Image: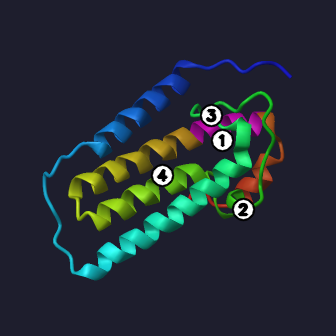
Amino acid sequence: MSERKLTYKDYAFVFIQLTLFVAYGLPVGIHSINFPDWPGYAGLVILGLSIFLGLMALAQLNTRLSPFPSPVSNGKLITTGAFKISRHPIYTALIFSGFGYGLYKESLFKALIAILLFILFYFKSKFEEKLLLQKFPEYKNYMESTRRFI
């Protein structure tokens, strides 16, 4: 199988993703949302479930993990486990953990970054899926039976 060639889109998606991750970690307090206690606890539950989903997907990908949307040359199509729940379980885990932690911290800034991550991962996954359809013809059936995110 031939070695994959990364494009400027691969690098652009990863650069924007890393920039948003760094921004998420900044101690910016543009506005705090004051909720009763229960939404904060719900945020922790969402965070915990997201971490579990992400760890399941990481274990399934093993050495085939890449931050780039272009499929790895030695990759195979995985449709079980975390990938039965979502076509992009790591993106899903990152989006929901961002929302969950933002809810827990009552941070409007973190919620906005999570929304930007959702938008980024939507477009990154569309690009990735175009390439996956070329590599795996059976991906079309998988797309019809499994949601992009949850």
Q: Amino acid at mark 1?
A: Glu
Q: In whole angstroms, how far apart are the C-alphas of marks 1 and 4?
A: 18 Å
Q: In whole angstroms, how far apart are the C-alphas of marks 2 and 1?
A: 16 Å
State which tag comes first along the sequence, 4 or 3. Answer: 3
Q: Position of residue 66 (x, y in %)?
A: 62, 34
The range drawn in magenta is 126-134
Per the image, the residue denoted by label 2 is: 84
Label 3 Cα neighbours within 10 Å, binned few <14 / some 14-19 / many ≥20: few
Per the image, the residue denoted by label 1 is: 129
Per the image, the residue denoted by label 4 is: 94
* Magenta stretch secondary structure, dominant: helix
Q: Secondary structure at mark 3?
A: loop
Q: Position of residue 122 (x, y in %)?
A: 50, 47
**Residue shown at 80%/31% (left/top)?**
74
Query: Could one spot residue 33 in this view of the protein?
Result: yes
Q: Position of residue 9 (x, y in %)?
A: 52, 25
Per the image, the residue denoted by label 3 is: 66
**Residue shown at 35%/39% (left/top)?**
20
Q: Position of residue 14 (x, y in %)?
A: 48, 30
Q: Amino acid at mark 2?
A: Lys
Label 1 Cα neighbours within 10 Å, binned few <14 / some 14-19 / many ≥20: many
Quadrant placement of the N terminus: top right
In the rendered image, residue 106 lying in the magenta stretch gets the answer no
Left or right relative to 43: residue 148: right
